[in-house]
Image (cartoon, helix red, strand yellow):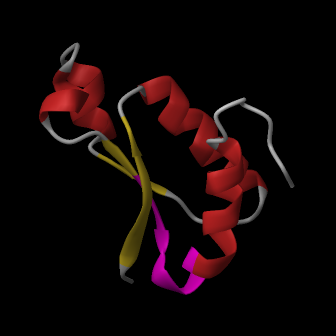
Amino acid sequence: MEWVTLTKVFSPVEADMIRARLEAAGFPVNLRNMGAALSTEGYSMAIGGIWVQVPGANEAEARPLVTSLQQPDGAATE
């Protein structure tokens, strides 16, 4: 299975919130670099962030959800 990165975030909390919303919508999720980000404070920035990924087959359906979660005003537009 090929994983596609939908977004990169630097906060483990933000990554976990996005993961939870995607999983609630039925998408499998991979949080690449999450372990490294949790192991050392500030390390997520050094490694390029935590990559929120879904299988390539789910990208077109999952991307709008992630985009709505990252609106500047914080309001989801579903």
Which residue is located at x 26 percent, y 29 percent? 37
Q: Is residue 61 toward the left or the right of residue 75 in the image? A: left
Q: Is residue 7 toward the left or the right of residue 59 in the image? A: left
Residue 2, percent from left and from top: 36, 81
Which residue is located at x 33 percent, y 38 percent? 34
* Residue farthest along the left direction in this orientation: 46
Residue 35, percent from left and from top: 28, 35
Q: Quadrant of residue 67?
A: bottom right
Q: Quadrant of residue 71?
A: top right
Q: Is residue 24 above or below residue 11?
A: below
- The number of discs equals 0
Residue 51 visible in image = yes
Quarter of the image for the C terminus: give it.
bottom right
Residue 27 visible in image = no
Q: Residues in magenta?
A: 52-59
Q: Nearer the viewer, residue 74 or 13?
A: 74
Q: Is residue 13 above or below residue 24?
A: above
Residue 20, percent from left and from top: 66, 43
* Residue farthest along the front direction in this orientation: 72
Q: Does the magenta-highlighted stretch encompass residue 63?
A: no
Residue 55, percent from left and from top: 48, 76
Which residue is located at x 15 percent, y 39 percent? 47
Quarter of the image for the N terminus: give it.
bottom left
Which residue is located at x 18 percent, y 17 percent? 40
Q: Does the magenta-highlighted stretch encompass residue 53?
A: yes
Q: Is residue 44 toward the left or the right of residue 12 in the image? A: left
